[in-house]
């Protein structure tokens, strides 16, 4: 119930900002992100360890972020997707044992600018969102299961530095993600998967991408804004 309330409240908030007189979308970010897990999910990795499947300790994803300025803040929304698979070295194609992670998330993000120049920007960021996560596990002897966490809340704090030109910059971002999956639902014939109560995907992250300044006016009437 809390996560559904959050999603509705966030949608209403950003919809209101999008049509506020002093708010205009102006930045589009495209990025890749690497998450290093602080606590390796041992119980999950143990399901496929006897088959030689590589352990899960890092996640990789790609994402898109749209930001705009509201007073002295930059506010926006971010979407990210993860689809990666772990299997055993020299495994057949398709593999008979694997661990696959799929996740898509949406979040509200606030950026606090400290340096804003034509060639360099620096800001602190705070992010809160919800994600749907599906983890497929298959073993050679015990069967397979699908472990899901729907609309699980996560957060990030970090900082980014952006280097380049007034209309285009390369972005480098790092920080900490808080993403502990609870209330898991497991389906399938892999009995041990039902005993996993939580999977902690929290840990430091690093993202690399680029920013395009200037989003077309049809998103908000008033013309195209380039730069800050």
Image (cartoon, rainbow, N blue to C red):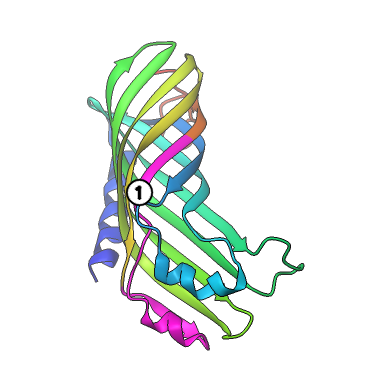
Picture layout, residue 76 above or below residue 137: above
Residue in view at x 40 percent, y 64 percent: 41
Residue 178, visible in the rendered structure? yes
Residue 199 within the magenta-colored segment of the rendering = yes
Q: Residue 221: which quarter of the image?
A: top left
Q: Residue 128: x and y, percent?
A: 29, 49
Q: Residue 147: x and y, percent?
A: 46, 75
Q: Residue 114: x and y, percent?
A: 26, 19
Q: Which residues are magenta?
A: 183-207
Residue linked to disc 1: 203
- In the picture, measured across the screen, residue 198 lies left or right of residue 212, that is left
Residue in view at x 38 percent, y 35 percent: 174
Picture layout, residue 162 above or below residue 78: above
- In the picture, measured across the screen, residue 150 lies left or right of residue 70, that is right
Q: For the residue labelled by badge 1, is the local secondary structure a helix, a strand or a loop? A: strand
Residue 136 within the magenta-colored segment of the rendering = no
Picture layout, residue 193 above or below residue 173: below
């Amino acid at each position: 119930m809390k996560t559904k309330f959050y999603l509705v409240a966030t949608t209403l908030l950003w919809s209101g900002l999008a049509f506020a007189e002093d708010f205009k979308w102006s930045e589009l970010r495209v990025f890749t992100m690497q998450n290093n897990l602080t606590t390796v999910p041992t119980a999950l990795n143990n399901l496929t360890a006897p088959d030689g499947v590589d352990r899960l300790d890092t996640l990789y994803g790609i994402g898109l972020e749209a930001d705009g300025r509201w007073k002295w803040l930059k506010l926006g929304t971010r979407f990210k997707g993860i689809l990666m698979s772990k299997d055993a070295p020299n495994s057949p194609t398709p593999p008979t044992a694997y661990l696959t992670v799929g996740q898509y998330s949406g979040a509200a993000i606030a950026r606090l600018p400290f340096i804003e120049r034509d060639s360099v920007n620096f800001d602190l960021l705070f992010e809160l969102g919800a994600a749907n996560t599906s983890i497929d596990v298959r073993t050679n002897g015990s069967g397979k299961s699908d472990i899901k966490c729907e609309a699980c809340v996560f957060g990030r704090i970090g900082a980014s530095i952006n280097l380049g030109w007034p209309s285009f910059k390369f972005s480098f971002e790092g920080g900490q993600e808080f993403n502990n999956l609870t209330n898991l639902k497991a389906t399938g014939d892999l009995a041990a998967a039902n005993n996993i109560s939580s999977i902690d995907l929290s840990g430091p992250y690093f993202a690399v991408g680029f920013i395009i300044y200037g989003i077309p006016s049809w998103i908000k009437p008033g013309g195209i804004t380039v730069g800050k």
